[in-house]
Image (cartoon, rainbow, N blue to C red):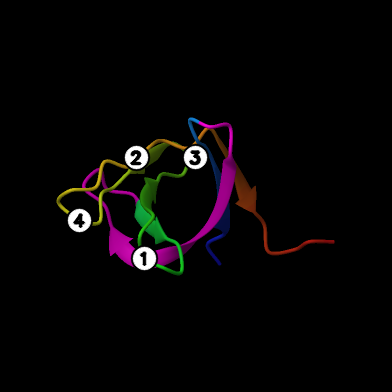
Amino acid sequence: MTPSYELTFEGEDGHRDVVVVHPTEAIGPHGARVYRDVTEIIQVEIDEHGEMVMLPTSFHQHPRHPTASRRLDDDSG
């Protein structure tokens, strides 16, 4: 099963947002799986090495790159 990822974004005001993205069946422009959050606003392509490419979900969106990411494994202990 493909894991989800937790992405952390730092705002200019120092505020931190944490978003969980889940795998989709879609493949991104670089050939890796696409992940989305539940709102489908955050969309990111993540390859097998954990390299990420943020993908805009609308024409006017300019997504920021996360400052941190963490793979959420299925077996939590």
Query: Marks 2 and 1: in contact by CB < 8 Å?
Result: no
Determine which of the numbered discs, if any, sits on residue 53 in the image: 2
Quickly name the residue at label 1. Answer: 40
Specify few, some or many for label 2: CA neighbours under 10 Å numbering under 14, 14-19, or 20 or more. many
User: Left or right: where does residue 20 sit relative to residue 60?
Assistant: right
Q: Is residue 4 above or below residue 11?
A: below
| Mark-to-mark CA distance, 4 and 3 | 24 Å
Residue situated in front as seen by the camera: 36 or 15: 15
> Disc 4 or disc 3, which is closer to the eye?
4
Question: Whole-percent x and y of residue 48?
Answer: 46, 44
In the image, what residue occupies the spot 35% across and 56% down?
34
| Mark-to-mark CA distance, 3 and 2 | 10 Å
Sequence-first disc among 4 and 1: 1
Question: Whole-percent x and y of residue 33?
Answer: 36, 55
Quadrant in the picture for residue 1 = bottom right
Sequence-first disc among 1 and 3: 1
Which amino acid lies under the numbered mark 4 shown in the image of this protein? Ser
Q: Is residue 57 above or below residue 12?
A: below
Q: How many marks?
A: 4
Quickly name the residue at label 3. Answer: 50
Which amino acid lies under the numbered mark 2 shown in the image of this protein? Val
Sequence-first disc among 1 and 2: 1
Determine which of the numbered discs, if any, sits on residue 58 in the image: 4
Write the start and end of the magenta stretch as one range: 13-32
User: Left or right: where does residue 29 sit relative to residue 42?
Assistant: left
| Mark-to-mark CA distance, 1 and 3 | 20 Å
Secondary structure category for the residue under label 4:
loop
User: Left or right: where does residue 41 sit relative to residue 67?
Assistant: left
Which amino acid lies under the numbered mark 1 shown in the image of this protein? Glu
> Disc 4 or disc 2, which is closer to the eye?
4
